[in-house]
Amino acid sequence: MTLTQLFAAIRASYIAVLAAAVDKDSVHVEPAYRNADGLLSLEGNPALPCRADWIPVEGEFAGQSHTVDAKTQLEFEPLSFQLSATKVSIVPFTWDWLPLQISSLTHVLAEATLVQWFTTWFDGEDKNARNAEGLYGVVHFMSAITQEDQALQVSIDLGSVSEAALEDLLFKLADGKAQSIQLG
């Protein structure tokens, strides 16, 4: 199994639930939270936008944001490999809640890398077209970056982004000279 195939398998269980939830009439699919003026609502540190999974347009729950959780987590033996000089470790995780640990990057460099990556895959202008799954291929959320022992930690809801987005993140962190990266 290749890395792309592993990411696709992890993604599949969440995407099936999300696609089924938004396969309804009159729902906003993966909407970004916006202020009254239409600009993206930015929260947290770093200040980033966020997306709901879906929001009904009409009915009893109209205007209320909804999220779905992966029903299952793909079980596999933890694996490790080298990506340039970076050791990458992967343990089971769900696509909608990826714990990420990064070592040997300064907080400033890690934040700049993560924010740039997140912003690219967030599609703040909502220009992405719906894909075959009925989704927009966008990341939904990234938590604050915290220091735990010798590693920086962050959690990411990968939303409906493709496997390529997660591979892109690994390459960007490796290019930044992270000593190690742990997914999950």
Image: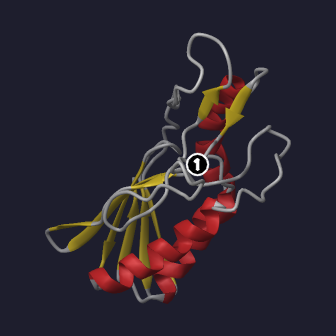
Q: How is the rendered protein coloured? A: secondary structure
Residue type pointed to by label 1: Ala
Question: Closer to the camera, 62 or 46?
Answer: 62
Residue 116, position as x, y percentages in the image: 52, 76
- 134 in relation to 139, above or below: above
- 122 in relation to 133, above or below: below
- 80 in relation to 171, above or below: above
- Say which residue label 1 marks: 32
Seen at 39% across and 65% down, the residue is 47
Figure label count: 1
Question: Closer to the camera, 19 or 150?
Answer: 19
Residue 175, position as x, y percentages in the image: 51, 88
Indicate left or right for 146 with 27 as reference: left
What kind of element bears circle 1? loop
Indicate left or right for 26 with 161 as reference: right
Q: Hey, which quadrant is residue 164 in on the image?
A: bottom right
Residue 134, position as x, y percentages in the image: 80, 37
| Observer able to see residue 105 | no
Seen at 78% across and 57% down, the residue is 128
